[in-house]
Image (tube, rainbow, N blue to C red):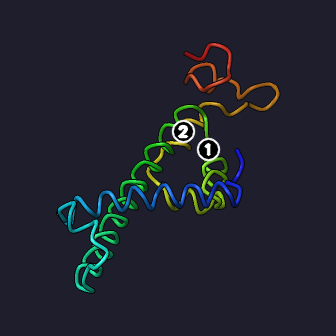
């Protein structure tokens, strides 16, 4: 994975701005003729920008939900906290704090390698992962 280039960030910013403006118009319920007039009053412009703020905040919340859902799916395919942190530009510890409910430790525990010679009777009879006779 790589970070966006400055040009890509600018392109994404323009696209997000257009989406925000579209949803702001829907939320503000402004008719098309009023939007096209260049002689909008200050009150109309203020309402337009406030509607954009509202749409932007709602988009932020939805994007946070999408990021969390993708984190859960990434864990299902083998990602751990170090990978989750790297994906969002944070440390492993920050990822663990952000998504404490993920079952990473349970999955990783099943992959632990046993020391040479195994763990003896307990591994064979209790079914610890990586031991002969484990279920």
Q: Of residues 94 and 110, which is closer to you in this image?
A: 94
* Location of residue 89 with respect to 113 vertically, above or below: below
Left or right of 94 in this view: 44: left
Q: Which residue is mark 2?
A: 75
Q: Which residue is mark 1?
A: 80
Q: Residues within 10 Å of mark 1 (few under 14, many from 20)?
A: many
| Residue 56: image location, x then y, percent | 37, 65
The tag earlier along the polypeptide, 2 or 1, is 2
Q: Residues within 10 Å of mark 2 (few under 14, many from 20)?
A: some
Q: Of residues 52 and 73, which is closer to you in this image?
A: 52
Please name the residue shown 56% across and 22% down the image.
Answer: 127
Please name the residue shown 24% across and 77% down the image.
Answer: 47
Q: Of residues 4 and 26, which is closer to you in this image?
A: 26
* Location of residue 30 with respect to 99 vertically, above or below: below
Label 1 element class: loop
Label 2 element class: helix
Marks 2 and 1 close (CB-CB < 8 Å)? yes
Q: Count of labels shown?
A: 2
Quadrant hosting residue 1: top right
Q: Quadrant of the C terminus?
A: top right
Which residue is at the far right?
116
Please name the residue shown 65% across and 47% down the image.
Answer: 83
Please name the residue shown 36% across and 54% down the image.
Answer: 62
| Residue 89: image location, x then y, percent | 65, 59
Disc number placed over residue 67 in the picture, else none: none
Which residue is at the far top?
133
| Residue 34: image location, x then y, percent | 21, 68
Q: Of residues 37 and 2, which is closer to you in this image?
A: 37
Instruction: Give the distance between the C-alpha atoms of the residues marked 2 and 1, in whole angstroms.
Output: 6 Å
């Amino acid at each position: 994975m790589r970070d966006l280039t400055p040009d890509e960030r600018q392109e994404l910013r323009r696209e997000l701005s257009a989406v925000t403006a579209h949803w702001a118009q829907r939320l503000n319920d402004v008719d098309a003729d009023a939007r096209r007039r260049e002689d909008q009053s200050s009150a109309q412009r203020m309402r337009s920008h406030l509607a954009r703020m509202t749409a932007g905040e709602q988009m932020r919340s939805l994007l946070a939900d999408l990021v969390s859902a993708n984190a859960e799916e990434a864990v299902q395919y083998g990602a751990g906290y170090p990978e989750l942190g790297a994906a969002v530009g944070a440390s492993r510890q920050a990822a663990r704090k952000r998504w404490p409910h993920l079952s990473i430790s349970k999955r990783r525990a099943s992959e632990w390698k046993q020391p040479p010679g195994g763990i003896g009777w307990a591994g064979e009879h209790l079914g610890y992962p990586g031991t002969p006779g484990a279920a």
